[in-house]
Image: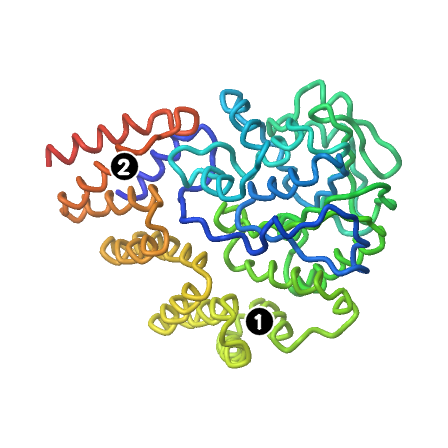
Amino acid sequence: MIRILVVLLFGLFVFACTQEKTPEPAPQNSVKTAQVQTLNLFSDPIELQRFEWTTQVLSTWQRFADTKPTLLLLSNDPLLMPVPEPLRAEVAEHLKQADPGLLAKRGSLRSADPLLLGEMALDAALRAGFFSRVVWAIPQQEGGTQIEAKALGQQLLDAGLATPGEVASLHPVGPLVEGRLRDTPFIVGSLSALQTLNGPVVVHIDPSYYEKLYRNEIRTPLLPLVKTSLEQLKALQIKSLGLSYADANLDHRFALDGRYLGDFLAMMIADPQKLDAELSEIWKGQAEILYLKNFMQKEKIAQIAKQMVTTAPRSAWVKFTLYRAAQESDAGEAALQALAEAVLLDPVYALEYENLAEQAYDKGRPDAALQMLQLATETFPDNPHIRLKIAQLSSELDDRKTAQHLIEQLQKLPWSPVYYPQMPDYLKGFAAHLEGK
């Protein structure tokens, strides 16, 4: 039943996305620390502006908007999904301040009344006039296939990310494609094909960049892949106003298993000398685990994960690595203990409880699924979608009182007529169903 109802709910959404809302974890670095001055990327000390939600990067971009810099975007997703027309005026008004807390609270389908989604970040920024030019570095290995303007334009058009007029402006310029999107000069190419970028530049790295490039540890070892991208950035000799990254796990744009990439990037950017240095023992261990997964070496992986925890007992991503190793070794209790410890260090890892709930339900254990959702809601108490799932399971398990209480709460929320136009009717029908049980 829970699966059927969740599928039904997805059908209500105007935009296909994910389904939860969380209490806002503070951004890892406050935007107030950003300085409006250019720095030599990978020469001068620079701090990675790291966020949980993709929409929060707008707070950094807004801070530099008066300078009208170039945006260098490393991403597989150009973040150009149009902001819904009925919300554009409200989005424009909020972007005058671009409060990171508000952008988190109303920046995804996790809330009842979203304003915009992570996939809309660049569209919103361009409509606000933040940049003089955008350079979209697509994930492509050096020596990859030449980008074709016609094919690129068709992909953007089919995805609803560009208008026919914008697509018509795209044309080849050497190994690059140039044109105008949202009335802003737009350049597309691989990092290796770019030349030195003149003027102040804001750099944003999206995790989808590495997700697209990565195949496996045999063909494309991940950590060396990341280092190579940073070396390519260094070669561009960029005068940077700032460099940002959004973990995007809460957006469900990037898997929890890759959350450690934010830590790795922050370390490399804070100390560029590490680009030429050997990896530390912790990162060597992670690289070895990634490699051994290709050969199903579960016992060896578990051994390495335990050693990593001994070395870095306060690292949430290391605890999560231990959790995954224990889970794959069918050590259920040890896995849940490691996950709980990871959640204590980094609450975002509580997203895994929802994955476990789905797995439990698929195995015919709605009771276990409910237990996992209750653990999730301890971390994300304001998440309306977790509460709805709990209501669904409670109803299935004949706990009508709990289901009715939750549905009554959900009916009081200000559901967006843009993103959730049918949700009030759905909840009304659910309430009537419970009354008739």
Separation of residues labelled 1 and 2 (CA atoms): 43 Å
Picture residue at 82% right of the left edge, 27% below the top: 171
Note whether 290 is above or below 59 in the view shown. below
In front here: 426 or 5? 426
- x then y, percent, for residue 203: 72, 46
Left or right, residue 195 beside residue 125 = right
Colour treatment of the image: rainbow
Task: Select label 1 or label 2 by which is in front.
Answer: 2
What is the number of the mark on residue 375? Answer: none
Left or right, residue 392 beside residue 71 = left
Do tag 1 and tag 2 residues touch (Cβ < 8 Å)? no
What is the number of the mark on residue 289? Answer: 1
- x then y, percent, for residue 227: 73, 62
- x then y, percent, for residue 27: 54, 52
Q: Residues within 10 Å of mark 2 (few under 14, many from 20)?
A: many
Picture residue at 32% right of the left edge, 29% below the top: 423
Q: What SS does tag 1 mark? A: helix
Residue type beneath disc 1: Ile
In front here: 298 or 44? 44
Q: Residues within 10 Å of mark 1 (few under 14, many from 20)?
A: many
Picture residue at 30% right of the left edge, 38% below the top: 5
Residue type beneath disc 2: Leu
Q: Quadrant of the C terminus?
A: top left
Note whether 259 is above or below 106 in the view shown. below
Q: What SS does tag 2 mark? A: helix
What is the number of the mark on residue 410? Answer: 2
In front here: 275 or 220? 275
- Earlier in the chain: of badge 1 and badge 2, it is 1
Left or right, residue 163 beside residue 100 = right
